[in-house]
Image (cartoon, rainbow, N blue to C red):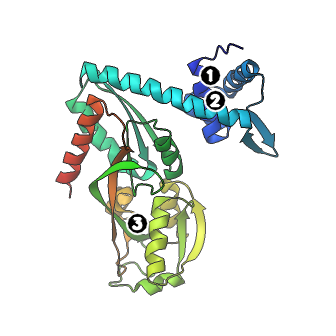
Amino acid sequence: MALHITMRQLQVFEAVARHLSFTRAAEELHLTQPAVSMQVKQLESMVDLPLFEQLGKKVHLTEAGHTILNHSRIMMGQLNEIERDINGLRGVEGGNLKICIASTVNYFATRLLSKFCEKYKTVGISLDVVNREELIKRLEANEPDLVLMGQPPDELDVDAQAFMENPLIVISAPHHRLAGQSRIPIKTMEDETFVMREPGSGTRTAMKRVFDEFGVTPHPGIQLSSNETIKQSVEAGLGLAVVSAHTVELELKAGRLVSLDVVNFPVIRKWYVAYRRGKQLSATAKVFLEFVLAEGGRKR
């Protein structure tokens, strides 16, 4: 049986399979949900097997779905390789970049990209800002040319180079009882409620690591998936938070938030530029990699 499957159908299917959500796939692809559903139904009609099943409110891949997903990622990876090879023949001018960045990196990455685009005006850049879990999925699927992130995942074979320090600090509202105090013992944090990122977040993992090291168990408060809502919650007095100093530069300058002088903080981590090991970078990606490392070196 000949299967006349289009790359667009595989692209839509892969997005639904990755998110296990028709709604989120539609948002990512800038399509309507009915359009996404139609593409998946057409693909199911061609293979004459269901690719998804819904149990309760959750969408799951069927065995056929897993098979199509594996092959679709291989095929899209090959298309990306073709694009990179062609861009390599063109050189940097006229090349394209697919960059994926962790949401926390977004606070300085836009300035970094602005400088790059000013220097290389003809380069086209596709930028996706996602949480750490989604970033690792895309890195595993070999989708982006390069990613900017915190600690690289141990479970993936990646080539990662640190380009800038990422200090983690404890923040509070200006009216908090600890604001303005010096050399606050880290054990004091056991008496405080913390607004935290979602499980799997790099910042949350680093926070747990340092608190575990000193035997500190803070009171868990609201769990949020956005740096912006964390900052707003801390400002409103809902608790303290451990955040990257890069995410609160404006709020600290404006006096809306304060950095607490907690012993053993700031915790210095690194920002990394990474890609799957063995990936053949295009000429444009190589230039961007060198640019990031050079710019980061100026800020060390």
- Front residue of this view, candidates 290 and 222: 290
Q: Which residue is mark 3?
A: 257
Residue 13 marker: 2
Numbered disc 3: secondary structure: loop
The residue at 67%/37% (across/down) is: 66
Mark 3: which amino acid?
A: Leu
Q: Is residue 130 left or right of residue 294?
A: right
User: How far apart are the alpha carbons under marks 2 and 3?
Assistant: 43 Å
Above-or-below relation of 123 to 177: above
Where is residue 154 drawn, in percent x and y? Answer: 45, 57
Mark 1: which amino acid?
A: Gln
Mark 2: which amino acid?
A: Phe
Q: Which residue is mark 1?
A: 9
**Nearer the camera: disc 1 or disc 3:** 1
Tags 2 and 1 touching, CB below 8 Å: yes
Q: Earlier in the sequence, mark 2 or mark 3?
A: 2
For the C terminus, the quadrant is bottom left
- Front residue of this view, candidates 226 and 47: 47
User: How far apart are the alpha carbons under marks 1 and 3?
Assistant: 47 Å
